[in-house]
Image: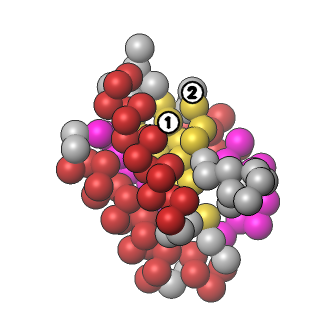
Amino acid sequence: MRKSILTAIDGSAGSVEVLDAVEDFARLTEGNVHVVHVGLPSVADGDAGRLILQDAVSRLRCVGVAAGGEVSDNPDVCGFLSDRARELGSTLIIVSPKHYGGRS
């Protein structure tokens, strides 16, 4: 069953772990992935956010996963991801719990 996956990254070590899971799941389900780099406005507007996003998308594409993405500085991360998933028709959202409301 083909999945449409939305994932959020921030360039941290947790993001690498999330991309590992996203890659595995996307390959297993022949899914496509939309990567969102969510950062502070100063990071999102600069090259750092775009480079983090480009690296993630390139990594996924190199292993045969259909991937694209965007950079966001929306301070309401959870609301933004929920709205974006709905707009994209994503059937799954994968994020790092450490950075998005989970326990450290």
Mark 2, residue position: 91
Magenta span includes 78 = yes
- Assess whether mark 1 and mark 2 are in contact (beta carbons under 8 angstroms): yes
Q: Position of residue 92 (x, y in %)?
A: 57, 31
Q: Which mark is residue 5?
A: 1
Label 2, secondary structure: give it: loop
Name of the residue lying farthest toward the top? 1
Q: What amino acid is labelled 2 in the image?
A: Thr
Q: What amino acid is labelled 1 in the image?
A: Ile
Judge by depth and name the residue closer to the eye, 42 or 10. Answer: 10
Instruction: Give the residue displayed 51% in from the left and 59% down from the top.
Output: 15
Q: Does 83 appear above or below 53?
A: above
Instruction: Give the residue displayed 51% in from the left and 84% down from the top.
Output: 46
Q: Does 4 appear above or below 96?
A: above
Magenta span includes 66 = yes
Instruction: Give the residue displayed 32% in from the left and 31% down from the top.
Output: 27
Q: Which residues are magenta?
A: 65-82
Give the total of numbered labels.
2
Q: Is residue 75 left or right of residue 95?
A: right
